[in-house]
Image (cartoon, grey):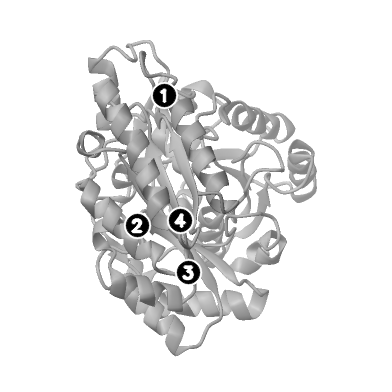
Amino acid sequence: MRVLLIQTLSVEGNLQERVYPIGVVALASSLLRSGHQVEILDMNLGKDPFGSVKGKLQSFLPEVIGFSLRNIDPLANKTSSLIPPFLVTVRMASSLLPQAWLLAGGTGFSLFPERLMQELPEIHYGFVGEAESSFPLLLNSLENPHGLKGLCMRRGNKIKIIPPAKGMDMACYTPPSRDLLDPSMYLDINSYVPPIGIETKRGCTFHCAYCVYPSLQGKKFRCRPPSAVVDELEFLNREYGVKRFHFTDPIVNFPRGHMEDICLEILRRKLKIKWDGFIRENGFDEKNAALFERSGCECFSFSPDGLCQESLDVLGKGLTEDIVLKAARIAAKTDVISVCHFMVNVPGETSETCDKGLLFIERLYEIHSRKKSLGTVVLNNIRIMPGTPIEAMAREKGVIGPETDLLYPTYYNPKPFDTFRYRLETMHLHENIFMWQGMR
C-alpha cells in the first residue's frame, strides 16, 4: 500500500528549535520492511506547511495517511495550542482524499486518544504508545482488525482502546532508515538544541508527579546494547555528517553503567561528536562526569524541578537539595555547560518556600560563577497532564474542575503565588547577565 506519514506541527513558527522526527521515521522503516511504499512529510520544515501537505497528498495519492501528533502545545508557560493545526491537517487530508484510511498516533495523541477521535470523526484508527509492530499488522486487516496492542477503534459512538505495547525488546531495535527522511536537512536548523535524536533506551523507573513517560513507555528501563547505539552514531556521522546528537531517553545516566559503556565505546572508536541529554543528579559523580565530557558531552541537562526540599518531595523526585547542589558542584568543575530546569508554584508553595527558591538559584550561580558554566535556568509552571499525581492534586485543591479540558494548555499556578515565576525569572536573568558580563 502507499502510505504517507505526516509529522504534524510540533512547534510554533519557523524560528523555534525543531527536531528530526525519529518516531515517524522508525514507524516508516517498519512499514517499509513489511513491503509498503512509504513517504514522510515533516510539516515543521518549510514556510508553507499546509501547502506542503496539499501538494504531497495530490502527488503521492496515498491509500493510508498516518498523522503523528508529537506535542499538544509548545509548553514553556505558553497558552497557545498545537491542536488546532492538527485538526485542520486531518480535515484537509479527509477533504482531498476522502477514500484514504486516516490513522493517528504519537506522544500527544497517546495522551488524549479518545478525546481526539471524538473530535475528529475523520480518523479511522489510532495508536497509543509503540506502534512499530502493530501498524504493519493493521494494514493487513483495515476492514476488521483484532487484538492489536495500542489500537484505538470506533465501536458505534464509543472509542475502544486496547492496552498499548510497552515491552518491545530494545536489544532487537532496528535503527530508523534515515534515507526515508534525510538528516542533512536538519543539521543547521537550530541555534541551541541538537536536532538529531538517538534512542538508547525506553521506559523510566522513576515516579515524578507531573510526568507521563512511565505510562507511555513503561516503568522499566529497556536498553539497547551500547555497541548498537554507537553503530548508529557512527553511521550518521559518516554518512550524513551529523556531529551533534541529543539522546532522547527520559534519563540518560540510568540504569547505572549503560551510558558509561556507550561513552567508552565512543572513545574506543575515536568518534568526534557532541551530545547532550537529561541527567539525574543522584547518578552523577566525578568519574562519570569526566567520562561524559571526554566522550563529547556538551551540555549537562539537569531537571531537579524542585527549588527546595518541600518542592522536591511534592514532585516525587526522590532527591535532596544536597544531592542537587553536589551534582552542580561536580558539573561546575568541568568545561561542560549546565542547564537546570525547575517547576514554579508547585502544590504547597508558601512564602517560605518561595524565599528558599530564590536562595537556591543564587547558590547555583555562585557554584558556576568561576567558569561561567551555567548556561541558563529554565523556569516553568507545571503543565497538568492526565493521569498524573499532579492532576489528582489539582483536582483535590480545586485548581481544576470536572469541566477543565486538559487537552488545551492548563498549568498548575494558583494564587497567591501565580506571579512568583516572574520574580524568579528576574533574579535568574540578573544573575545570568552579571555572570556572563563578568560583573558577579
For marks 3 and 1, the one nearer the N-term is 3
Q: Position of residue 32 (x, y in %)?
A: 57, 63
Which residue lies at the image location 58% right of the left edge and 60% below the top edge? 194
In three-dimensional space, the C-alpha distance between marks 4 and 1, rounded to whole angstroms, equals 25 Å
Q: Position of residue 367 (x, y in %)?
A: 38, 55
> What SS does tag 2 mark?
helix
Q: Nearer the viewer, residue 63 or 238?
A: 238
In three-dimensional space, the C-alpha distance between marks 4 and 3, rounded to whole angstroms, equals 12 Å
For marks 4 and 1, the one nearer the N-term is 4
For marks 4 and 3, the one nearer the N-term is 3
List the residue tagged with mark 1. 420
Quarter in which the N terminus is drawn: bottom right
List the residue tagged with mark 4. 369
Which residue lies at the image location 56% right of the left edge and 80% below the top edge? 272
Amino acid on which disc 1 is placed = Phe
> What SS does tag 4 mark?
loop
Q: Is residue 276 left or right of residue 84?
A: left
In three-dimensional space, the C-alpha distance between marks 4 and 2, rounded to whole angstroms, equals 11 Å
Q: Which mark is residue 328?
A: 2
List the residue tagged with mark 3. 335
> What SS does tag 1 mark?
helix
In three-dimensional space, the C-alpha distance between marks 3 and 1, rounded to whole angstroms, equals 32 Å
Classify 10 Å Cα crowding around label 1: few (below 14), some (14-19), many (20 and above): some
Q: Are marks 4 and 2 in contact (CB under 8 Å)?
A: no
